[in-house]
Image (tube, grey):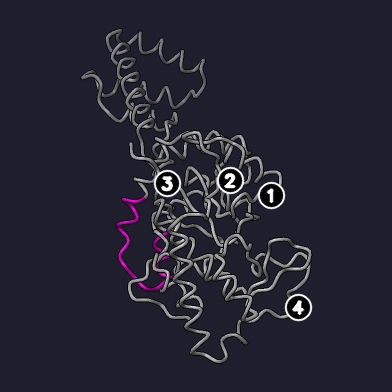
Amino acid sequence: MPAIQDALYYPNIHITNHRWLKTNLLTFPHILRMTPHNYVPDDDPMIAKLSRAMGARGKPLIDQYDLNTPPVYRATDILLRKLEYDLNTDPDFAKKYSVGDAWLVEGAGSEFVLHENKLGFALRDLLERNRLAVPVNDERGWLAVHPTLVSAFMSCVAAAASKERGLEIVTDDGAIHDAVASFDTSAIYDAIVHGRKAPGMLKRPRRTRLAQLVIINNFDVDALSVNDLISMSQEEDALFDFRQKVAATAKKIPEMDSEEELQSHLSHHAERLFEDWNESRSSMSGFAKRFFGMSVVKDSESTIGDIVKGFASYGTAAGAGAVVSQVLGYAPGLAVALVIRGLTVFADMRTAEKTSGLRYLTLLNKKGAATFVPAPL
């Protein structure tokens, strides 16, 4: 089985939305964060525990991507040239993206800051000389930068890192995701800074959106503990098959520009996948339906009809026992045939469930993520 694609989180280091994180950890084996060299994030207890917990392939569920790599250096060089061009050709550029004194406060929001170790010397020098970056008070190593430039820089770096390691980019900021998906540093910069959408720009993979809709719309992921997430991360075979099943379904959705229409299609198929999973589970009702829905002997139809009615009228273990006695009274051969047929059908159903592309949902359900009808967001 091929290794399952991991995810790269951006544009921030710290993850604060636990539901978003749990949903992504259920659709990717690991999530990597872009961190400066030797930087230790100040995480909340749950995030910190997930960063230490070993998941699939002996890697932490929340891992780090070291930015000291050649692809990141190349992306930074391109970004440097783009900024130099804008500063030299647009007299209002520096003023538009300069850092105001109002941002130079302790605890500035993450959307306004970059760590100096994420920037090469030349890029940092260019930003500081043009007052596009200044040190944040009492925050060693952090620079206050206009949020648009922060997004542009982190998005360019994310695209380079993703391409190098074959990672899928994930973010809780949907507004900038489509630009990053292009993997083209220059196009990303132009899309975020100048609002230009490059031809052929990619969208977030439909397979990921569909898989997450199936989970978030139908399962209570909030109920999952850190240990549950660790356990689910070990189910790589089931996750791989689930992603394959979802990907095949996503291919059925036609190409379209309307995001509203696409969301409607995704929601519809997510509902159908959930219904398919519900129907495939080895419930007694499904077993009985298949068991009695096929002829197992050539005895009298009225005799089998009486037996079926007997099962329906009891519904308890004692009642079932009484019906078995009734079966034996009619014909021992019939009873043996029924038992053999029942065992065969049940074994077939269990085999189908264990090899189903949707068995990952069964595992998720057993971990405590109960199914529910969610309230409107």
Q: Residues within 10 Å of mark 3 (few under 14, many from 20)?
A: few
Looking at the image, is mark 4 or mark 1 nearer the viewer? 4
The residue carrying mark 4 is: 102
Among the two numbered marks 2 and 1 on one chain, the one whose residue lies closer to the N terminus: 1
Say whether marks 3 and 4 touch (CB < 8 Å). no
- Reading the chain from its start, which is encountered first: label 3 or label 1? 1
**Residue to which mark 1 is pinned:** 43
The N terminus - image quarter: top left
Q: Is residue 336 left or right of residue 53?
A: left
- The residue beneath circle 2 is 221
Disc 2 marks which amino acid?
Answer: Val
| Residue at 42% across, 31% down | 282
**Residue 8 is one of the magenta-drawn residues:** no
Marks 4/2 in contact by CB < 8 Å: the verdict is no
- Frontmost of labels 3 and 4 is 4
Real-space CA distance between mark 4 and mark 2, rounded to the nearest whole angstrom = 39 Å
Tag 1: amino acid: Asp
SS class, disc 2: helix
* Mark 3 / mark 4, whichever is N-terminal: 4
Provide the residue designation for mark 3.
275
Q: Label 4 is placed on what type of residue?
A: Ala
Badge 2 vs badge 1, beta-carbon distance below 8 Å: no
Mark 4 to mark 1: distance in Å?
26 Å
Please tell me which residue is depicted at 55% across the width and 92% down the height of the picture: 91
Where residue 55 appears, x then y in whole percent? Answer: 52, 36
Specify start and end residues of the magenta stretch as a single range: 247-266
Judge depth for marks 3 and 1 and give the one in front: 1
Separation of residues labelled 3 and 4 (CA atoms) = 53 Å
Prevalent SS, magenta region: helix
Quadrant location of the C terminus in the rendered image = bottom right
